[in-house]
Amino acid sequence: MKRIEFFKSLMALIGIGTVSQSCESEDTTIETIEEEVAVEETPEEESEYDILKAKLDGASSLLEDKKLYIDLSFSEYDTLKTVGNFYNDTDNYVMILRKDEEKILAFDNCCPHLGSVTKWSFANDKFTCSNHNNSFGINSGMVAPCSSGMTSGNLKQYSVTQVEDIIVVDFNS
């Protein structure tokens, strides 16, 4: 509760709704007290978005403590504006997929068959590695680990949270 609301509630509780002329010996009114209290209020805390923007400090992405922060407002991520498109971030070994209007998913971009990270396509809810044309799903269950020699299964998926145009990929998930 803000101080001014507390003060008004307290005044109402003890039966003081307004200050009459006879009580204004020090030229104090409720309005004056409200102004003084308002000046003392602390500014609102920074929003989560502001904190994330500050963390990125003008960069399009940042890897820190097994979390990847990505600012989707940068043009390199424009492909993610379209449902079904993905961005292969080979620097951070992750593929970011725009699953639908609200949902963005993240997957390990290491091919389970032989470890390639660069040659992927996506269609029908499957990523296909063009090195040997093996396809891997985006569902949970039967995860095919990187370079395991597996030719089917699902890619490892990471947790993604989104705050406006910033996503956070958690590699601990």
Image (tube, rainbow, N blue to C red):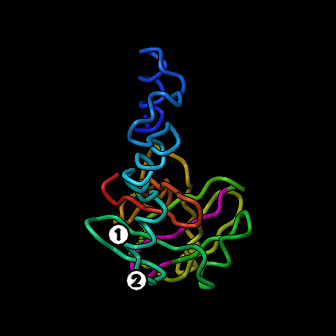
* Amino acid on which the number 2 mark rests in the picture: Asp
Q: Find out whether the residues at labels 1 and 2 contact each other: C-beta distance under 8 Å.
A: no
The nearer-to-camera label among 1 and 2 is 2
* Amino acid on which the number 1 mark rests in the picture: Ser
Q: Quadrant of residue 79?
A: bottom right
**Residue 147: image tag:** 1
Visible in this render: residue 109? Answer: no
Q: Position of residue 87 (x, y in %)?
A: 58, 75
Q: Position of residue 59 (x, y in %)?
A: 44, 84
Visible in this render: residue 113? Answer: yes
| Residue at 35% from the left image edge and 51% from the top image edge | 173
What is the quadrant of the N terminus in the image? top left
Nearest the camera: 153 or 101?
101
Q: Is disc 1 surrounded by few (<14), some (14 to 19) or many (20+) residues within 10 Å? A: some
Q: Is residue 97 magenta?
A: yes
Q: Quadrant of residue 169?
A: bottom left
Q: Is disc 2 surrounded by few (<14), some (14 to 19) or many (20+) residues within 10 Å? A: few
Instruction: Give the magenta part as a residue range.
Output: 89-99
| Residue at 38% from the left image edge and 41% from the top image edge | 26
**Residue 162: image tag:** none
**Residue 91: image tag:** 2
| Residue at 42% from the left image edge and 31% from the top image edge | 7
Residue at disc 1, secondary structure: loop
Compared across the picture, whether 83 is left or right of 33 comes to: right
Nearest the camera: 2 or 108?
2
